[in-house]
Structures are given as C-alpha cells and as structure tokens.
Image: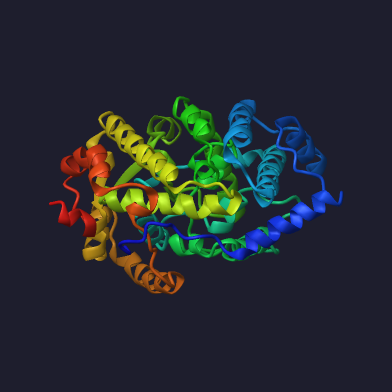
C-alpha cells in the first residue's frame, strides 16, 4: 500500500468526453434520456426478445428497490444513466431467453449439481486465487468470465459454433479499460478466465455488484433484510444452463465463489444443500481498504459525486456484516463440510495450502498441480501492476477498522499485514 496519499485516484478522461457527447446529443434532441422505470425496462426487453415470460416474478421487487435507490441516491452522470439502462435491459432479455431455453430443452433443469465446492470470504480476501487454482483442475466445472457477464445463450446458438458472448465480453472489457483501467488491475481477468457467479445472482437484480458500482445504500439495507433463496434458486437454474451449453459432465462438482455468499449463507445452503465450503480470511485493514478502493474505482465511472469517506464507511459496515453473518451461519454447518484458509498461508506456501484443501475434499492434488502452476504463471501476466490503495484515502484509520473487526482477527488468528503490524 502507498502511504500518505489522502486523495483516491480519478477516472480517465474517456468518461468525461462520453458524458459531454451524450449531454450534447440530448440537448440537440438526437437522443432521449434513459428511462429507468421497471415497466418501461420490461417492455423494452419484451420488444427486443419477442418473448414475454420472465420466469419467477420474485426479481421484480429487488428491481423496484434498486431503481428507487438509483433515482434517489446514485446521482448518475449521463454515461452512468445510459449504462444502467443497458445493464437492466440486458438482464431482463437474458431472463426471457433463459425461460425459452428451459421450455425448448426441459432436460436442462434435470441436470444435477452435486457437491459443489464453494469458496467464501470477504471481498479482497484471496477467494479469486483459490477459485482459479481449483478451476485449473479438470475434475471440476467452472464458469468463465464471458458466462458470468452473459449467462444465457443467444437464440440460435449451436454447439461448436461461434458464441457472440465471448465477443461481447471482449468489448465490455475494452470499454472498462478506457473508463478506468484500475478496475481490471484490481481484479485482473479476461473473457475466458475462470470467474465468479456474481452475474447469475444479478439475474434476480440481487447482490453487492450493484452496491460496488452505484451509491445505493438503501438498496443494500433492503437486501440485507430479505431471504435470498429465490435469487439462489435462479442462480442454480442458470448454472444448469451453462453446464449444458458447455457440454460439461453433470457428475463433476462446480467450483463457485463470490463474496455475496457471506451475507446469504442460509439461502446458499438451502439451494446447494451438500456444498463443501472453503472460508478465506485476511487482515481486515487490507480487506476494507481494498474493497473500498474497488467500489470507488467503479463508482467514479458512473457518477460525478462519489464521496470517498462515505464509501469507506459503507464498506467497513458491509465487511462487518459479512463477518457477523458468516460466523452465525457456520455454527449450523457440520465441521467436516468446512475448512479455513488464510491469505498469508496462500502467500507463504500456496501449494501447501492447496494440499490441505485437497485433503479436506478427499482428492489427490498431484494430478492438478501442473495446471495450477501454469495458472500461476498466467496470472502473473494478467496482473500488470499492483493494486495501490490505503485506508486514509477513504476516511478510515486502522484503529477504527480494528475497533469493528478486531474480534474477528482474534477469533480466527488472522495474521496482520503492514499497517496492522505497527498496531501490534
């Protein structure tokens, strides 16, 4: 981390230029302002897809709450409003297409999802590294980045033919680099890289993905009070569709991960009742600072009014809630179904840590090790520069974070990093 840098980074000029262009187009009557209303968005999706069955209507309430928070709190710029409309319509179109695939091929929903391995931890706690190492093992199924961006096949898809979703993912990542290249420095990826299932929860307009890109705290508080089981049921349906489209064996377990599961463990386990759980832990000073940095670097793309101290407070509270809910839920889970892995353990000896995970899973690590080593080499190429951040940028101090999360450190024996070491 870089010390004594109180101001977080700015976005690139690309968004400023795009905002100016969109504003001019509106002023000249060449472009209508985006309409962020549920009825209008659903009508637009129906017209695009030529379909009208969105599946389980549970998603409509999260969508309503999200749009209300966007209107009242997010203060989106012109590019942010346009992007929000495009994102919402895409999710709705995907829901329409998904229901059609399920009707045309009912065998999709009969596919089993046996004993998934789910990596669970706070944002920025090393879940991605473990998830991608496990994904290198061909004994597991995994999602790729283009599949979490676009979980649903387009009409007319044929096995072995071109898949436009890969092209779309490439385009989205190019735009992300132009808008703020730091977002892909923080979470390096590519269209075919293993990726988390966050996009499958977004199918129900559910989860922290929205909170990490827009300032919508009321939506976050509402979600925290809901039972997320319907969102996880939809995630499972989409996972079956993706497995079918990959022509992957339904006997192989899936490897899954997203920090959202920290908040929703009871719902996750209702849907994936035989899951095996890998819990990750890291110094909360690094977790909170890195999570706030990730949210900041995305929010400044879509809004000209992002406040770093406000974002810092929000992600400190969110991390505290994640930890509290994880600890409460774990008391109800059999010990043989869960294992704890520490970030510093992976940093010190990742092969030793993975060997411990494989003993927990009852598998031999040796067959997967060459592919894991190859992944480590490829990952070094993806991450071109370190993620540079500190707590001070977001109005936080180590003392404040540890006042909230010191009990977590003590209970799990978490090793402290740089700033933490000075506090003993």
Q: Residue furthest left?
A: 424
Closer to the camera, 415 or 331? 415
Q: What residue is rendered at 43% in x and 30% in y? A: 267
Q: Position of residue 80 (x, y in %)?
A: 64, 49
Q: Position of residue 205 (x, y in %)?
A: 58, 37
Please state if 12 lies on the left or on the right of 122 as rendered: right
Q: Position of residue 61 (x, y in %)?
A: 61, 26
Closer to the camera, 285 or 367? 285
Q: Position of residue 235 (x, y in %)?
A: 53, 39
Q: Quadrant of the N terminus?
A: bottom left
Please state if 223 lies on the left or on the right of 79 as rendered: left
Q: What residue is rendered at 34% in x and 43% in y? A: 276
Confirm whether residue 46 shows in the render.
yes
| Quarter holding residue 329 | top left
Q: Is residue 77 above or below residue 4?
A: above
Closer to the camera, 319 or 265? 319
* Picture mark count: 0
Q: What residue is rendered at 25% in x and 34% in y? A: 334
Confirm whether residue 163 shows in the render.
no
Q: What residue is rendered at 70% in x and 63% in y? A: 161
| Quarter holding residue 316 | top left
Colouring scheme, one of rainbow, by chain, secondary structure, one colour: rainbow
Please state if 25 lies on the left or on the right of 371 as rendered: right
| Quarter holding residue 279 | top left
Q: Is residue 391 above or below residue 277?
A: below
């Amino acid at each position: 981390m870089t010390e004594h840098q109180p101001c977080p980074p700015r976005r690139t000029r690309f968004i400023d230029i795009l905002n100016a262009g969109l504003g001019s187009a509106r002023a000249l009557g060449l472009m209508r302002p985006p309409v962020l209303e549920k009825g209008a968005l659903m009508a637009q999706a129906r017209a695009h897809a030529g379909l009208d069955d969105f599946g389980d209507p549970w998603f409509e309430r999260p969508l309503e709450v999200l749009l209300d928070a966007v209107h009242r709190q997010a203060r989106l710029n012109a590019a942010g409003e346009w992007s929000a409309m495009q994102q919402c319509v895409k999710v709705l179109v995907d829901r329409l297409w998904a229901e059609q695939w399920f009707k045309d091929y009912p065998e999709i929903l009969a596919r089993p999802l046996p004993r998934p391995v789910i990596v669970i931890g706070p944002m920025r706690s090393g879940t991605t590294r473990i998830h991608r190492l496990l994904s290198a093992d061909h004994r597991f199924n995994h999602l790729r980045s283009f599949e979490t961006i676009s979980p649903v096949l387009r009409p007319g898809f044929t096995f072995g033919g071109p898949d436009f979703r890969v092209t779309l993912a490439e385009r989205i990542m190019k735009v992300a680099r132009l808008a703020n290249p730091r977002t892909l420095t923080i979470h390096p990826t590519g269209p075919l890289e293993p990726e988390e299932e966050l996009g499958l929860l977004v199918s129900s307009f559910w989860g922290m993905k929205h909170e990490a890109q827009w300032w919508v705290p009321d939506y976050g508080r509402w979600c925290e009070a809901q039972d997320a089981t319907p969102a996880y049921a939809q995630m499972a349906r989409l996972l079956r569709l993706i497995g079918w489209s990959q022509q992957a064996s339904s006997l192989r377990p899936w490897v899954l991960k997203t920090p959202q599961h920290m908040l929703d463990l009871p719902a996750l386990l209702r849907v994936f009742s035989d899951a095996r759980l890998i819990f990750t832990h890291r110094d909360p000073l690094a977790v909170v600072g890195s999570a706030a940095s990730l949210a900041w670097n995305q929010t400044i793309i879509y809004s000209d009014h992002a406040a770093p101290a406000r974002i810092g407070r929000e992600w400190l509270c969110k991390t505290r809630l994640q930890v509290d809910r994880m600890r409460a839920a774990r008391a109800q889970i059999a010990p043989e179904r869960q294992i704890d892995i520490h970030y510093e353990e992976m940093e010190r000896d990742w092969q030793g840590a993975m060997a411990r995970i494989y003993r927990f899973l009852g598998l031999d690590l040796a067959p997967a090790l060459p592919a894991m080593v190859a992944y480590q080499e490829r990952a070094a190429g993806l991450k071109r520069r370190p993620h540079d951040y500190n707590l001070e940028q977001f109005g936080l101090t180590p003392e404040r974070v540890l006042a909230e999360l010191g009990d977590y450190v003590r209970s799990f024996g978490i090793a402290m990093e740089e700033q933490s070491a000075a506090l003993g």
